[in-house]
Image: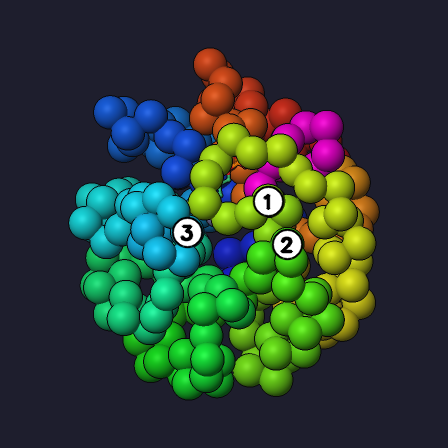
Amino acid sequence: MSWRDWVRTVEIEPSLYAADFSRLGDQIETLLRAGARVFHFDVGDGHFVPPVTIGPIVLKWISPMILEHDGAIDCHLMVENPEHHFEAIREAGGSSVTFHYEACDDLPAVVRAARAHNLQVGLAFKPETSAAYAAHAALASRVDIVLCMSIEPGYSGQEFMPEAYERIRTTRSLLPPDVPVQVDGGIGPDNIAAVREAGATLFVAGSSIFGREDLPRAYRRLLQELA
Ligand code: DX5
Ligand code: ZN
């Protein structure tokens, strides 16, 4: 399975970083029933980003329920040396790894290592990184998706940076049509349509889903804004 099979024109990916971890399985089940299929899983190492977040030990408990529903787990690695984690992520049931342009000295080698573990591959870049550089590197290394960060990576609940629109447009214009642009950070009902307009088709949503009482309703609200 690949990103091409997972994405239904557009895809809203609940970001589990913002979930209530005392009820993680229930919240995933609820969102699966509401129609969510691709879940975003943020790994932070305390070096590339300040917080230590979640990793393969949590992933292995939740991957079976998502995979059983023909879903996928998109792992966003906010870490140095991302290749050190590929094997553990694959074994825990991860479907894809998206690592940072800023964290790779030898991007083609990191992409090869991910493919060797049968993982789909994404390239992320931070707000201060040139979108043109990142997009060219993504093209040259033939990644499957490109993630344009609309916040400084690290925490859920930050505000969308409006400068991201221009970076999304630039990224979209430099990539072939079969490489989706993903946006992560501060996505909600007020900006999701404009983010799509700028060229994104994969939308990561943490607090705008898990910060609400009614998760299915929050998920559907985002979908409606794209309709
Ligand atoms: C933070 C993560 C995001 C985060 C998004 O750096 O990469 O995926 O969970 O959360 P919101 O949607 O609340 O900005
Ligand atoms: Zn993320």
Residue drawn at (58%, 61%) of the image: 125
Contact, CB < 8 Å: mark 1 with mark 2? yes
Q: Which residue is mark 2?
A: 127
**Label 3 or label 2, whichever comes before in sequence order:** 3
Q: Nearer the viewer, residue 151 or 122?
A: 151
Q: Earlier in the sequence, mark 3 or mark 1?
A: 3
Q: Secondary structure at mark 1?
A: loop
**Cα–Cα gap, marks 3 and 2:** 14 Å
Query: Is 117 colored magenta in this rendering?
Result: no
Name the residue nearer the viewer: 16 or 218.
16
Q: Quadrant of the C terminus?
A: top right
Secondary structure found at label 2: loop
Q: CA distance from mark 3 to mark 1?
A: 12 Å
Dominant SS type (magenta): loop
- Relative to residue 93, is residue 223 drawn left or right? right
Q: Is residue 72 visible?
A: no
Tag 3 residue: 49
Foreground mark, 3 or 1, reads 3
Amino acid type for the residue under numbered disc 1: Ile
Q: Amino acid at mark 2?
A: Pro
Query: Can you give x and y, in whole percent of width and height, for residue 51 in the image?
Result: 35, 44
> Of callouts 1 and 2, which one flags the residue occurring earlier in the amino acid sequence?
2
Range covered by the magenta-colored residues: 185-192
Spatial distance from mark 1 to mark 2, Cα to Cα? 7 Å
- The answer to whether mark 1 is within 8 Å of ligand 1 is yes
- Residue at the location (45% across, 64% down)? 99
Q: Residue 129 at what x, y percent from top left? A: 64, 63
Q: Give me the disc on residue 151.
A: 1
Label 3 amino acid?
Val
Q: Is residue 186 magenta?
A: yes
Check contact, mark 3 vs mark 1: CB within 8 A: no
Give the quadrant of the N terminus. bottom left
